[in-house]
Amino acid sequence: MKQSRFTGWSFSAALIIFLSSCGGNGNGNASTADSTAANDSAAKAASTIISTPQNMVVVTHKVKNYATWLTAYDAHDSARVASGLHNFVIGRGLQDSNVVMVALRIDDTAKAKAFIKDPGLKKAMEKGGVVGPPMISFITITWQDTAMIDSKLRSIVSMEVKDWSVWLKGFQDSKQERLNNGITDRAVGHDLDDDKKVNVVTVISDSAKAFAYYKSEALKNTRQKGGVIGEPSRFIYWVAKVYR
């Protein structure tokens, strides 16, 4: 995942099943209507999965005070929109709530990169009390699940892999392993310019199981099979704000 010194991935859809009732007229209309409703519901559930690639920028930095920073951040929104950047999610670190992660959707990559280098952004960050240089990543999200999920605890992992396709197949094959350990896939992607630099966002529904899994031999073996190089970088955060 590409990072620059300065620049500066909440939900579970229920499938509604309509059960047909037995009628005395035997015309089958109720069954037909119920079948159509069930199919419509299934289609809506499936629509929570988005596989159309979406470019995003993720900014992580520490702030002196979250409320002060958020006021300054929201005040700078018009400048972001003018550069084709749209608010998506704000997260706050689990270990340090003043470490803030911001994810924004990108309309125009060139404009987004120019915005990141603009002196006006530096001033806005200073006004918001950003401490130290931010970490900036330009990412292409290739898959995401937008279903409603109660848990707001998330994990974003960055890692380098030998081959994107090999890693992705191994990741998909190990989905049940993650589910068994309180982890639900949320988004998958890679660096905008390098698909060997991978990013994964997951929902943590059982922190005890998930944190134990992160240290397990099972995960280590899965990574080895997928061709992960070195030790991944993980940031665990609470979803603080979601923009619609």
Image (cartoon, rainbow, N blue to C red):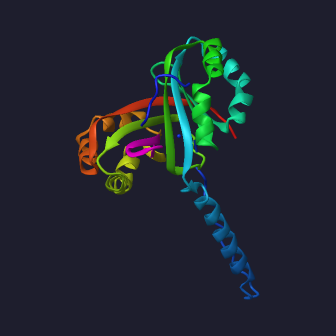
Q: Give whichever of 74, 37 is nearer the camera.
A: 74
For the question of whether residue 48 can be seen, the reply is: yes
Judged left or right of residue 33, residue 163 is left
In the rendered image, residue 233, in percent from the top left (x then y), is placed at 36, 32
Q: From this view, report whether residue 123 is shown above or below residue 223.
A: above
Q: Residue at x 62, y 30 (%)?
A: 115
Residue 156 on the magenta span = no
**Would you say the magenta stretch is mainly helix, strand or loop?**
strand
Q: Residue at x 70, y 19 (%)?
A: 71
Q: From this view, report whether residue 214 is shown above or below residue 132.
A: below
Q: Quadrant location of the C terminus?
A: top right
Q: Residue at x 46, y 46 (%)?
A: 189
Q: Give whichever of 108, 65 is nearer the camera.
A: 108
- Bounds of the magenta segment: 190-202
In the rendered image, residue 20, in percent from the top left (x then y), is placed at 67, 74
Q: Residue at x 73, y 81 (%)?
A: 23
Residue 48 quadrant:
bottom right
Residue 193 on the magenta span = yes
In the rendered image, residue 169, in percent from the top left (x then y), is placed at 35, 57
Judged left or right of residue 55, residue 167 is left
